[in-house]
Image (cartoon, helix red, strand yellow):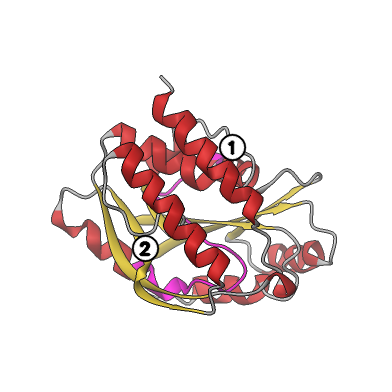
Amino acid sequence: MKLSVVIPVYNEKGTVATIVDRVEGVAGVDKEIIIVDDGSTDGTRDVLKEIAANRSHVKVILKEANCGKGASLREGFRHATGDYVIVQDADLEYDPQEYTKLIEALGDGKTRVVYGSRFSGNYEDMSNLHYWGNKFLTLVTNVLYGVLLTDMETCYKLLPGSFVRNLKIESNRFNFEPEITAKILKSGLKLREVPISYKGRTHGEGKKITWKDGLSAVYTLIKFRFAD
C-alpha cells in the first residue's frame, strides 16, 4: 500500500524540516510526501526550497497567497497518488510513527477510513478551550449524524485515495475537518477510531486555530448534514 502524506504549511520555519524527517523515518510504509506552503512569510519557503533541492522524492508546492488549511489540502490532494492519504500538520503535535496504528486498523477488511483519536489515547498540553471545543464539536457531529465518534477534529484521518481524489472540498480554512467528516459519514464508508498520542502547543508557539473556527465548524456540520 502506498501512503500519500499531505503536509499543509503556513509559517512553520522552525518545525517543517523536523516533521519531514519524522515522516521519512516511519519504517515499513511506502510513502510519498507532498508539502503545500500557504504563502508563508517567516522564512519557511527558504527551508522548503532547500528540502526540494535535496530530496527529489518530496513534492513541494508554493502558493503565492494565504488561503487557509482547507485550500492547501485541496491542492495537495490533487497531487496525491497513493492508495491511502493522510494529513500531517507541520507543528509536531502529532507523531508520524503512529501511522502504522491507523494502517493496521484497515486489516479487518471492512474498515475504509481510520481516525486517530486523541481522547481515547494520550494527550498533553491541550488548553481548556481546545479540549471543550473539540468535545463539543464531536458531540454535535454525533447528534447530527447518528454516530459515536470521540474525536472528530483530529488531524489524523486515514482516507482512501480514490475517495479523496473524487472529493470536492469547499472549505478553505479549518472547517475542512467537519466538512470531510460529514462527507465520509454520508458516503457510508465504514469508519473506525484508534487511540493516538498528542502534544499540544500554544498560540505563542504558533497554534492558529481559534474559537471563531469552532463556530464555523458548527455551521459546516449543519450545512453538510442537510446538503444534497
Residue 211 appears in the rendering: yes
Please provide the residue range marked out in magenta: 78-100
Give left or right: position of 22 versus 46: left
Where 46 falls versus 14 (above or below)?
Answer: above
Which residue is located at x 79 percent, y 61 percent? Answer: 45
**Image quarter of residue 53:** bottom right
Q: CA distance from mark 1 to mark 2?
A: 21 Å
Q: Position of residue 79 (x, y in %)?
A: 55, 43
> Within 10 angstroms of label 1, few (less than 14), some, or many (20 or more) residues?
many
Q: At which x and y percent is residue 142?
A: 32, 46
**Contact between labelled residues 2 and 1, with CB atoms less than 8 Å apart:** no
Residue sitting at 66 percent across and 70 percent down? 16
Q: From the image, tell me which residue sits under label 1.
A: 171
Left or right of 168, for residue 62:
right
The amino acid on which the numbered mark 1 sits, given as a three-letter code, is Ser
Residue named by callout 2: 116
Residue 85 in magenta stretch: yes
Image: 99 above or below 183: below
Q: Quadrant of residue 97?
A: bottom left
Return the mark for residue 41.
none
